[in-house]
Amino acid sequence: MNLSRRLDQVRGTDSPPPLTEVVPQNPFTASSAPSEPATLGRIHEAKAAESASAADLVVLTQTAAASSGALGALKERASQALYERLGARITDSSLEEAELHQYVKDELKIVVDEEQVPLTTSERQRLIREIIDDVLGHGPIQRFLDDPTVTEVMVNRFDQVYVERDGMLFMTDTKFASDDALRRVIERIVSKVGRRIDESSPLVDARLADGSRVNAIIPPLAVNGPALTIRKFGREALTVQKLIAYGSLSPDMAELLHACVLARMNIIVSGGTGTGKTTLLNALSSFIPDSDRIVTIEDAVELQLQQDHVVRLESRPPNIEGKGEVAIRDLVRNSLRMRPDRIVVGEVRGGECLDMLQAMNTGHDGSLSTVHANSPRDAIARLETLVLMAGMDIPLRAVREQVASAVNLIVHISRLRDGTRRVTHITEVQGMEGDIVTLQDAFVFDYSAGVDANGRFLGKPIPTGVRPRFTDRFVELGIKISPHVFGAQPVRGR
């Protein structure tokens, strides 16, 4: 029975009273008072019916809330009973993932049947799905991790979850049952990659099986309770062609970058947090020939290189006794003994910058890395600062000479106000002029085109018309590049 039918029953009739029969009287005549008592009666009946319908709506709302609360309580009881039945089986490494899922599903059906609560088919399926997500998956945020349109999931506290779609943030109505439920999900994630999180080590970087980056922090550092941030990686790596289709790169930029990678130039990808540096680094690495031996070094494995000849190294945090740490810097040093043709460092954020620059300057050309910075000029300043973090007393001029000699190209990517990620600069590092590292832009983003009706930037990257000095290297290596790339004359031999 639908709601309108129930409202009609409350009124006592199948249709509302004809209010059009109430004829308004002229207030300025002597007979301004209603002359028919029946009219007033109809008005009172209508008001009573409206009051009754409002009361009926309240009852229906309360009933729905009570039903939802009862389902939530049933979920809590069933989850607890399931944990008791599973015991240590849930962490048994000898069980395959599919076998564990089937075992949990079978046990859960027994638990739900023992509750003897009448449930519809849809309610039963929903209850089983949610409990399995809680026990084996990532709880209520599992649906966002399965949603390809969501690029980031941010849990500020157990009852506040945000997601990112198309570069914009949205608050959801999803929430965890409690801090403990959120904490269980965090511990399940970090334990799978051999890391831990507790009061003595209350923050951790980890990754999911698909390569998505995870950061978690718990009390006492997180005042409002555990917080979880997951930056998702697409199921398929973004290729250069897709970046061009999305407007992040122009075809001319892609052609230039392809030539630079083939010419074994050292490239730094710079940008702010969440701008897509690692995605762009993945795309650039696709230009590396299959014959080259590649060694990747990361804090948490994220790169998705398509080549076969790849050795992937990942740093390790200290154990519970504070020992056993293997830092990025140790891995960079070790990689030099592995006969690499290319060294790809996921991100330089400390003293390893010095070792990476030394590698670039000592025969390991064609290396790639990323760095946090707001512009190409800031990227140079940040590299200088990171070198000084190595703890060695090096004169600033010597540091700048090292940077200017090692780095050939800076590719800067930005997240614009409309949520899109665009490569806004391709900048050549030309060398030293006095005490200053000189830079020359080959491409810059044209902001002067403005925005469209939807607030999306209409501009695109344009060449500055200045041909970089490294194009002479293209000629020496026989690498051809289209004449129109720089918006100037074709590259000619000397």
Image (spheres, rainbow, N blue to C red):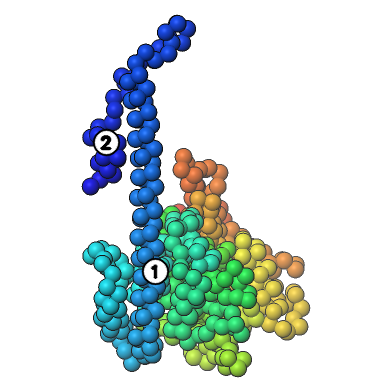
Report the Cα–Cα distance between label 2 and label 1: 37 Å
Residue found farthest to the front: 37
Secondary element at image label 2: loop
In percent of width and height, residue 363 lies at: 55, 83
Mark 2 / mark 1, whichever is N-terminal = 2
Categorize mark 2 by other alpha carbons within 10 Å: few (<14), some (14-19), many (20+): few
Residue found farthest to the top: 29
Residue for point 27% across, 73% down: 116
Please give left or right for residue 203 compared with residue 182 in the image: right
Residue for point 69% across, 73% down: 385
In percent of width and height, residue 489 lies at: 49, 54
Q: Which residue is mark 2?
A: 12
In percent of width and height, residue 310 lies at: 41, 83
Which of 172/193 is in front?
172
Q: Nearer the viewer, mark 2 or mark 1?
A: 2
Examine the image and state in which quarter residue 470 appears. Answer: bottom right
Q: Which mark is residue 17?
A: none
Q: Is residue 108 above or below residue 45?
A: below
Please give left or right for residue 428 compared with residue 251 in the image: right
Tag 2 near tag 1, CB within 8 Å: no
Secondary element at image label 1: helix
Q: Which mark is residue 73?
A: 1
